[in-house]
Image: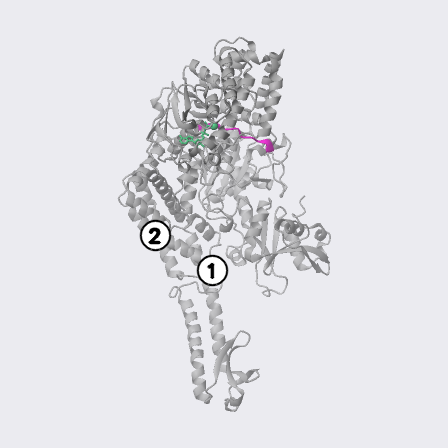
Amino acid sequence: MDPALGPPEEMAEKRDELTPMMRQYHDLCERYDDALVLFQVGDFYETFCGAAERTARLLEVTLTSREDSTGEYPMTGIPIDNAESYIEDLLEAGYRVAVADQVEEPGESSGVVERAVTRVITPGTLTEDELLSSDDNNFVAAVARGAGGDGPTDRDADLALALLDVSTGDFLATSSASNEAIADEISRFDPAEAVVGPDVRTESGDAGSNANANADADADADADLFPKDCMVTPFDEAVFDRDRAAETVADYFGNPDSLLASDPEIRACGALLEYAEYARGSERDAEAKADDGGEDDRLEYLTHLTRYDPREYLLLDAVALRSLELFEPRAVRGRDEATLVGVLDETASALGGRKLRDWLRRPLLEPDRIEARLDAVEELKSGVRTREELQELLRDVYDLERLIGRISRERANARDLRSLRDTLAVVPDIRAELEDADCDRLRRLHAALDPLADVRGLIEDAIVADPPIEITEGGIIAEGYDGDLDDLRRTARDGKQWIDDLEERERERTGIDSLKVGYNSVHGYYIEVTNPNLDSVPDDYQRRQTLKNSERFVTPELKEREDEIVGAEERADELEYELFRDVRRTVADEVERVQDLADALATLDALVSLATVAAQYDYCRPETLEHERTEDGGLEIDIEGGRHPVVERTQESFVPNDAHLTEDRRLAVITGPNMSGKSTYMRQVAQIVLLAQVGSFVPAKSARLTPVDRIFTRVGASDDIAGGRSTFMVEMDELATILREADERSLVLLDEVGRGTSTADGMAIAQAITEHLHDAVGATTLFATHHHPLTEVADVLEDAFTLHFEVDQEDGEVVFRHEVAPGAATGSYGVEVATAAGVPESVVERSRELVAEAETEPVDPAKEEGEGEEEEEEEEEETRELDPEEVEGPELEPEPEPEPESEHAAETETTRATGAATTTTTATADGGDDPTDVAAELRALDLGHMTPVEALTELDRLKRLLEE
Ligand code: ADP
Ligand code: MG
């Protein structure tokens, strides 16, 4: 148990003797025992005992102590004024933070000031703008597993996932029979936090330690579901109970059985709702609580629950998301904008930014929906003036989703309401721009842009134009909105006017010219008379204060007026607060309309952004092909002059390339030297396909595409050494997934597969995979490889073909043309490049000899290829310096090379193991007859149905066979 959580032991022992304040602290710690309690004492949040020691270390604040009659307790304090940054650090360290605020004014009651947890801040349930990224969602997830078997439907055995963005109200649910499918959805939405049901096995999360760090293999079976930076914790089992969850869901959205597909989904959603309520804090400010009877913790702005099936969208697993650089640059030194979202995001509002990210996360499958977006993008692209006008107007759109969330949670101040009003004020102009829209999508947006005139009118009438941040100190409600308030204000004003005039009147009455009327916060209003004039003071003056040179007086009338003013002002402040909360509640009642408007604005912004990019960077509208066009639902990818959307932005000049993949040309083996453009080419094809399904124009001269269901990638040598797995294991793992799950509607990218092992093994695996993808899977595949013999395999396979990249030499310089061409690379480029790079003539000569030898007689391919590979790598270093165009190469190179150490280790080990037997393997290279059983067995391997471990075991066995 983390000593920072739960009631401190040293207090628990003597709870009944504690001072009232410390008892309060103890009890709150007990009640919120899975959060670190920040306890308001005046202007500070304090922590005590174990929590104090922990926060002192984490936040680098001084550890002091508090002493009272019952003992001495370690203590830290952080200033409330900038608590957010401290809280952020606590969250980062893996804590939930329960904020216990003073909920009554000191002195309001006789005993100790009442405190209540007004919010529990957790990584996944943030609503504080300071802690949130504005253009991305922040999700918390709940996962529940079905009991299986005895439920009313088969689906009850599924794993269900619910996702909620507490700040915006986005709420989604899905489920699947496969753990992997749910893991893929989780990586798509990348929740900051997850709570899991009792039947989901993860290491029980100690706050402060990373939840799934070193769980043993069995216990973390489900921990694999979550990315490392996601805080995973079990939550109160009771909330996952079917009946209780169904009730919770019903309370928000109506009949759960009609909304959701299975019991696990209901349980995940119900639990997540309760978790969100928990995070809201048990009590809001005391008055708000009193208003709704202290009962209702409902989050009113959660108005939509969307149940979806992962199969409705193009599936992108974590590997694909990463290698296609959707949201994060691959290169460590990569710049943030070197991502797909970076090049596409020209949105003007936070709403639009989030919408665009959601579209990228979930590209569409249905041609109709894709075309509808494309129609809108096309119209906005060609309507230059409208587009620019819209973008300008959209800049004035506030984050309505979070605003209405705050309004609904009663966290909004008067400025927030005015911000809502300001946004509503631009809606009519935005609407007007769409008045003549042609396409269906834009016309529907036009109709959906409800300017909420009633809400805007209410705010304009009720709230002053530039209100203060504080909502309890008046100055918020506009003149004329409320008669009583106006009366009170008039009273106060008249009173003040009377006082303002008093000086003049009293001077006349008393004849004392130096008489002054003043105000001080202790004594209130007074009349001040200097000592020489004291004789002229009238009888009704009452002495209040004696100063050195003067006396201060009041009169009964002045006192009366003063009380009137103060009373009126106080009552006015209170009334204003009440009126403000009424207005806020009235606005909150319109939450759904505001959310619908927000969605329309977000969609429009995202479309305008796509149109802007399309216009600015010369994208073309892709043609969406129906699957029916092709006989067995295969894909057609037909790109002319395609460019890599990210690389072209960082490259001075980018060489466009075509891609033609059809049913009978669906597997391309791509060869060419390092740095020639293979990886870029493959990724650009996939990104163009993906962009088209987002509904975006694409960087190409023309593109005709059938939507793909899923993009698989195995790109570069990613290494998971930290996760305790070798490169090779990772590679095999990813391959196994591809072979198991790909089908004829998948697009598969394989980049340098087989690098993690000896060349002989790598080649064998590469060939077996190629054949399997071709014969059994039927996926559209791009395979970049340094295994040249693979091009011969492609020649044999019916629906496979070869592509290659050439390197030129001009005046002794290596020139990368980056141009894809049919056929296989010659294979001799390595030596040529070496020459150009200035490798000594004798070495080059010897290389030529060896190449010639290799072409005539079988040699140890492990050695040959192994060396070849190293040579290439070195060459790459050289050529970067040689080619002026490549000056930025190292920085932009998106593909991290494998860790030298690990690669080296793998190499030496396997070389030793294959040793004598390798010659036999060469024969497989030509794809002809299999001279050995081993090759035949390799061919027969059903990789699609093997686990990585099985694959390794099998490989090991085959190796042994060869060695015998
Ligand atoms: P490979 O995979 O063959 O080693 P890459 O695809 O990684 O080569 O490309 C290496 C570098 O060459 C890229 O980082 C990019 O800077 C540049 N490059 C690739 N393709 C093109 C292209 N079509 N036009 C211009 N530069 C390109
Ligand atoms: Mg590459």
**Which quadrant would residue 949 be assigned to in this image?**
top right
Q: Is residue 243 magenta?
A: no
Residue 469 numbered mark, or none: 1
Q: Is residue 742 in sight in this rendering?
A: no
Residue farthest toward the bottom in the current orientation of the protein = 535
Which residue is rendered at x = 52% and y = 20% of the image?
842
Q: Is mark 2 on a helix, strand or loop?
A: helix
Residue 268 numbered mark, or none: none
Q: How crowded is mark 1: few (under 14 residues within 10 Å), some or many (20 or more)?
A: some
Q: Is residue 716 magenta?
A: yes
Q: Is residue 885 left or right of residue 439?
A: right
Q: What stretch is highlighted in magenta?
A: 710-722
Location of mark 2 (residue): 426
Q: Is residue 926 in sight in this rendering?
A: yes
Q: In which quarter of the image is the C terminus?
A: top right
Which residue is rendered at x = 30% and y = 42% of the image?
443
**Identity of the amino acid at label 2?**
Val
Q: How crowded is mark 2: few (under 14 residues within 10 Å), some or many (20 or more)?
A: some
